[in-house]
Amino acid sequence: MRIRPDNILLCILWMLVVTLGACFWFNTIFGFNIFSGAHWEQIATLQAAQTPVKPEFYISMFVVIFAVIMGLYLIIRPRMRKIRLPIVKTAPIHTSTKSPQQTPVQQNNPDASTLDILPTEIQPATFHQDKPVSSPSASSRPPRLNIPVPNNFARPQTQQNTPPSVKSAPATQTPQIAPELREIFTSAGYTVKPAPRVNGIQIALAAIGTNEVMWIGCVGVKTTDVRNIINAFEQIFTDTLEETSIEINGFAIAAPDAATSEFQDILMFNTPDELRQYIQQNPNPPLPADDDGMFDAYSEYIDAVINHIGKL
């Protein structure tokens, strides 16, 4: 339970409302002024003399006290966070049926020639294996087989052997710098979380701190991509949280568009040493005394969000 100024003001307002309502009720029904000391002395004298008092008076007092306690509880009671993560539906993977049909033929005929494993669509119609094959003599010349070989027959192998084009800068820099970034935030008191891949980009660091703060950092990534990653997290927070707001701090190291970036809320550093100096000046504050396990619940929620966003 966290005591906030708005909750204190609401409690004071509720007590004033109940007090004014009780004053009006007792003055109208019983002619009793709850702000008068003489009236309370008269009630005490009647109770000491065992003089009967209307039961409605005591019932009204009980209702007023119950209304005050119940209203204060509803205002300052701890609220459990409701996490509603959407269900990701993945389509089943269909395997190809061409390779199993060719495998038994190759296993049953281990001594077959290379002509047996050619695809059926390119074998000539006049070629038959039903007749017994006689071993050719040394003087006889084997007949020439005019087997058409299509030009696209060897292309799939060339395409499979060609590696896809990838961005070399983030792929090579992120695994090397990520351990150093985790050490920087851990030494500053932050809790480091697993770094997922969002929008096809590998995050270099994901960490959380007190007061529901989250850090997201990338290496060699444009600031526009970092902003899109932050927007993806903020969208999930908006869809799953009702009242609590999470502050996200994003940074980029060696961003290609650092000179022309328009995002003022994304920190940009040239080297990890510059980031270390900044984090040492802004460490994670200690947990408040009235945390009551809120940080642990926040940490579990971030784990669920990272697990979910990594599957998108």
Image (spheres, helix red, strand yellow):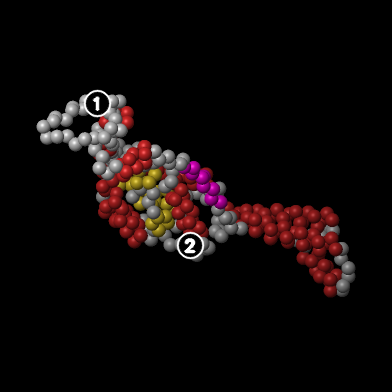
Asked if residue 255 can be seen in this view, the reply is: no
Quadrant (top left, top right, bottom left, bottom right) of the N terminus: bottom right
Viewer-side residue, 195 vs 264: 195
Residue 100: quarter of image = top left
Image position, residue 29 (x, y; %) = 84, 56
Residue 63 point in image, percent of width and height: 76, 59
Of residues 94 and 189, the one nearer the viewer is 94
User: Label 1 is placed on what type of residue?
Assistant: Pro
Instruction: Name the outermost residue toward the bottom.
Output: 48
Few, some or many residues within 10 Å of mark 1 (<14, 14–19, 20+)? few
Magenta run includes residue 8: no
User: Residue at the spot x=69%, y=58% of the render?
Assistant: 70
Q: Can you identify the residue that label 1 sits on?
A: 148
The Cα atoms of the two marked residues, 2 and 1, are separated by 80 Å
Q: Main secondary structure of the magenta part?
A: loop
Is 81 or 143 nearer to us in this picture? 143
- Disc 2 is placed on an element classified as loop
Q: Which residues are magenta?
A: 82-90
Tag 2 residue: 288
Residue at the left extreme of this rendering: 139
Q: Are marks 2 and 1 in contact (CB under 8 Å)?
A: no
